[in-house]
Image (cartoon, helix red, strand yellow):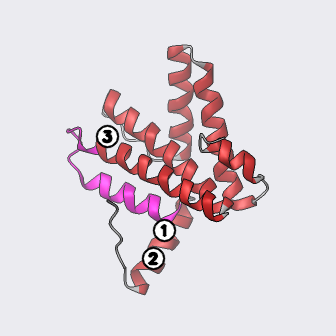
Amino acid sequence: MALIIELPEALAKRLREEARKLDVGPELLAIELLAEALNPGSKDRAEAYWSAAEHMLKKAEEELAKGGLRQASEKIWGAAALAVKALAHEREGRRLTSHGELWGYVSDLASETGDEELGRLWRSATSMHVNFYEGWAPGDEVRRGSGGR
């Protein structure tokens, strides 16, 4: 069950401003801040990232059902980013904090495993992040980006 938290306007404004600086949505920033507070040596952080990724994917599906292609796109990208963060933490105890680190991790992982599909899927997810800002992707492409048909 999701928890909805209402923030005072001043805090909500600050969260949006900080998220904009980092080129992420406010929901993704809030998840990241909570994950930072968890014990870095435990599996809690990886589990929090994975749970948040699943939540973001559900939210993407809800946005798609409403026709909110840009919001769905951002949530698809957020889910992918959180899944990569979960994997990095689970495998190496590593915390990825930037788009560049996400790209590098996926690239290294694809090279290490020989799985070229991983890189293709990451590029697809990243195109959803771009679509959030540009709004050029048609609905069927956003649905494919979420794993839907």
**Mark number, residue 18:** 1
Q: Amino acid at mark 2?
A: Arg
Circle 3 or circle 1, nearest the eye:
3
- Mark 3 and mark 1 lie on one chain; the one further toward the N terminus is 1
| Front residue (pair 4, 113) | 4
**Mark number, residue 131:** none
**Mark number, residue 46:** 3
Q: Amino acid at mark 3?
A: Ala
Q: Is residue 149 left or right of residue 29?
A: right
Q: Is residue 56 left or right of residue 64?
A: left
Q: How many marks?
A: 3
Q: Are marks 1 and 2 in contact (CB under 8 Å)?
A: yes
- Mark 3 and mark 2 lie on one chain; the one further toward the N terminus is 2
- Main SS of the magenta part reads helix
Could you give the CA–CA distance between mark 3 and mark 1, rounded to whole angstroms? 23 Å
Q: Quadrant of the N terminus?
A: bottom left
Magenta stretch containing residue 31, yes or no? yes
Q: Badge 2: how crowded within 10 Å, few (<14), some, or many (20+)?
A: few
User: Dot 2 corresponds to which residue?
Assistant: 14
Q: Quadrant of residue 125?
A: top right
Q: Quadrant of the C terminus?
A: top right
**Start and end of the magenta stretch?**
25-45
Query: Residue 88: x percent and y percent?
Result: 39, 33
Could you give the CA–CA distance between mark 3 and mark 2, rounded to whole angstroms? 26 Å
Magenta stretch containing residue 73, yes or no? no
